[in-house]
Amino acid sequence: MNTDGSAIIEVEELSKAFRSRFRRSSVQAVFDLSLRVERGSVVAFVGPNGAGKTTTIYALLGLLNPDRGKIRLFGLPPKSEAARRRIGFQSEIFHTYGFKTAERALRFYGQLAEMPAEKIAEAVPRQLARLGLGAASRRKVRGFSKGMVQRLGLAQALLHQPELLILDEPTTGLDPEGRKLVAEIILEEKNRGTTVFLSSHILSDVERTCDHVVILREGSVAFSESMMTLRGGSDEWEIEVLNCAPRTRESISGAEFREQGPDILVRCSTADKNALLRRLLEAEAELGAVRRTRSLEDLYMQYAGGTSHG
Amino acid sequence: MVKLRAIVLTSFQETLHRRVLYLVLILALIVIAMMSSQMVYARLARDAGETEAVTNLARSLFEQILNTWDFAAFFLALFLGAVAISSELKSRTIVTVLSRPVARWSYLLGRWFGVLLFLWAFLAVGVLGALLWGALFNLQYGSLFWLGIADLFVRATFLSGVSIGLSVVLPPVAAGAITFVLTILPLMVKDTMGHPNWIWRTLSTLGYYLAPAHMRVDLIGDSFKKEMVDPKYFLYGQVMLENFLYTGAVLLVACVIFRRRELRLR
């Protein structure tokens, strides 16, 4: 992580409610949300549908006016053009003009990002190739598959090499190959020093790419921690035993385990781990992975699970 | 300037891809084709040496073609202006555009200029077609003719500008309908401004000041009348200028409102 401690995104006590036309009912989308994203970090913003992720992102982009609270991007208000010049944004489902070719669509977004013509001419084919759309550059977007449109959305966000990337569920509609590509691009951008604010449901990608995770529940931050602390802070371990034989089963008697076909997953505490491993090795068990059990998924279920309001 | 040009061009291209345009175009062409059946009479009159009858018929057709095209432009201006922003909201293409360093006013004006560029091109094609028709029959135009043509362009500017301006705060159907009502408001209030009932009188006066300037003469039709004396060029020009300024004022207010407006997407 190439952070220098300076804040790129600062949100203080942000609240936003959506009222019906005649104000008879209202939905509190975000309540008292505060967060800080440091330069060069990759922050995951996770939470169930309706937790307020997209509302927060739209408020960050100045597309929604907060009811209360303060937002600063690069120390500037979100509606400031100077701030938005330094941002690349991809929406959950990228919507663009179907009559434009991929190349022309990117050219258009490059012009809106105030890129000089020569930079556009150089960046458009490069980003299209990077996202695997080189061969489709002259095809109209209306003929693209959902995954191709999403890739194009990421290409337009990356086009002007922004200092801050805001990605709202960038892997929606992508196949595993596309998901892998997006994760790789996030890592590349991270290495380049780009700050990434990523909203995602794919927790394995978050674990792989992010430095910090913010779990949102009912419009508020339920959990916020660095991935490093998360990885190091668990007291529970999981030992994978492959093709478990009866002799192996005897060696783990008393321990909590779960069967997965011919394999088993044994759970134990840090204190018991070494003794258990010794017993398993003595029983000539075929060992698989040994990992901490407190995965992001566990945390997600703990802090955000069971919510599904709008 | 590059950003504005990009938005204008995209708005123009988007207009060219709207199905309603082709529907209106086909209907207008069908009406014009039906009118052209009168050509048979023109040919008969020419064969009979009735040159004045031929000229009158050609003149009448000329006016009808121009009126049909103007009506199509009228409808398109209302429709395209009213949906220029709402269609972007509906398709959500606005999100990526406004997440870029694009000022709201430049986005709004860019969308409008794109529609306007199309409308002016559409009118230019119609006017050129009508002029070609006139050239075939050697029609002579009076001094008001070009002012009448200019008025067609001003009207398209007014209708599209006011409807896009109103669409910032109103649903597109309401924006288009109110713009239409505004255009006929001067005729509606004309007779009730002196009404004995004060409510009618007040409403009419309010409507009078709210309404755009009304061109009380048919500039193109009257341009063929040889007996037209003392044409009030200054007054006609003033009406057009007022409608330009009216459009500008509506758009100015719309830009101020749009600057604060949230993007509520469904």
Image: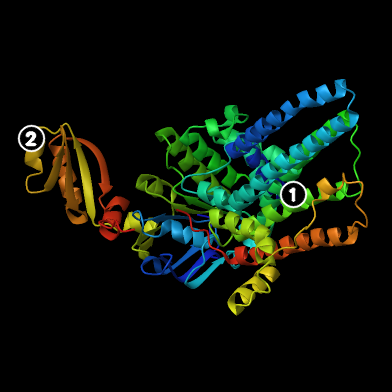
Visible residue check, residue A125: no
Front: mark 1 or 2: 1
SS assignment at label 2: helix
The CA distance from mark 1 to mark 2 is 75 Å
Q: Which residue is mark 1?
A: B2
User: Which residue type does callout 1 highlight?
Assistant: Val
Instruction: Please indicate whether residue B105 sits to the left or right of residue A57 in the image.
Output: right
Instruction: List x then y, in percent, for residue B25.
Output: 66, 35
Instruction: Please indicate whether residue A188 sits to the left or right of residue B53 in the image.
Output: left
User: What crowding class fits label 2: few (fewer than 14 Cα within 10 Å), some (14-19), or many (20 or more)?
Assistant: few
Colour mapping used in the image: rainbow
User: Which residue type does callout 2 highlight?
Assistant: Arg
Residue farthest toward the top in the current orientation of the protein? B47
Residue at position x 29%, y 56% in the image: A308
Residue at position x 51%, y 42% in the image: A185
SS assignment at label 1: helix
Q: Which residue is mark 2?
A: A247
Q: Name the image quarter holding residue B70.
A: top right
